[in-house]
Image: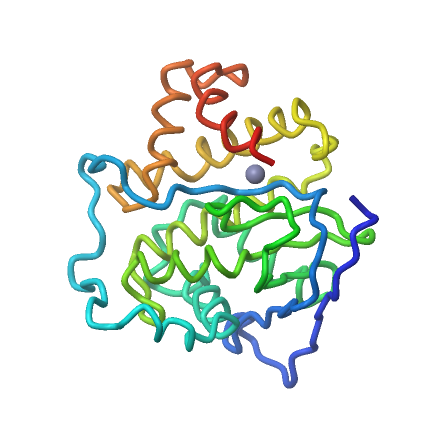
Amino acid sequence: MARNRGRQASQRQGGRSSNPFSRGMRVGSATVILAFMGLFVWTIVRKQSKPAEGLADHPSLPPIESQSKGSYADVDLSAAVNQLFSSVDPSLPENQYFPRCAKERVLWITTEKKAGKLSIILLKNTDNTNLYFEDLMASGIVEGKPMIVIAGPRFLDFLVEGGRTLPPFTQRQRNDFALGLVHETVHLEKENTANPAILQERLAEELRAWRKVDLNVVRELRRLNQPMNPRLIEADDALRSCGDRAECESLREILFPTETTR
Ligand SMILES: [Zn+2]
């Protein structure tokens, strides 16, 4: 996967601030076509297939219905990524419910990004990549450097479906985005020795990441009745049915179909 070439924008942020989030997370905007065959990908479902029990989107933020589809072309995705990232700042009072693991992981991304050790790229065009249409994020080591990729087309859908393309984002948008980031940090751990080009290795690594994020973040958010993508709930139910064991056929069945499409 180190063979992948990508323009890695790592613009330095001017000025200093005691709050690492106050200036927002500057993301690179990749317009070059990248052959991302070597990335682990995070897929969340597009539509809620069934109402998740006890979970609801933020009631005070109704979906934007008057906006015509064409006008979404004007959405500044780079700005939205930055704003959404800022909105999951674990030091903000409204994010104090984030489980410890989520806080630490999001902070880690900020620290690594600032130190130039991690790239975050918004990929505006996902043609010629192994990103499936429902994939929101991906990560991997590109040219020796950890990278998190946000898939532009899916990210736009994510904003539109959530009802907000600008701050304030909904509670669910913030939860889902933070969960995606946490998920990618798990793939960037040293424990991940899987070759993403090999289905069985990729699947095993996805099982590891989904389980780790579930046990450390999703389950706690669920206990707090926090809204999130139904796929995360489904995966949590599957893992529970397996007694939280690492070998979990039910969870594997959920992840297998998307992994085989790559
Ligand atoms: Zn993954």
Q: Position of residue 187 (x, y in %)?
A: 63, 40
Quadrant of the drawing holding the N terminus:
top right
Q: Is residue 161 above or below residue 131?
A: below
Q: Position of residue 225 (x, y in %)?
A: 24, 42
Q: Position of residue 108 (x, y in %)?
A: 61, 55
What colour scheme does the image use?
Answer: rainbow
Tell whether 126 sits left or right of 165.
right
Tell whether 148 sits left or right of 3.
left
Ligand 1 rendered quadrant: top right
Which residue: 56% across, 33% down?
261
Which residue: 22% across, 52% down?
57
Tell whether 48 sits left or right of 26.
left
The mark tally for this picture is 0
Q: Is residue 197 among the parts visible in the rendering?
A: yes
Image quadrant in which you'd find residue 7 = bottom right
Q: Residue furthest bottom?
A: 15
Nearer the observer, 11 or 18: 11
Quadrant of the drawing holding the C terminus:
top right
Q: Is residue 108 among the parts visible in the rendering?
A: no
Q: Position of residue 78 (x, y in %)?
A: 52, 72
Which residue: 64% across, 85% down?
15
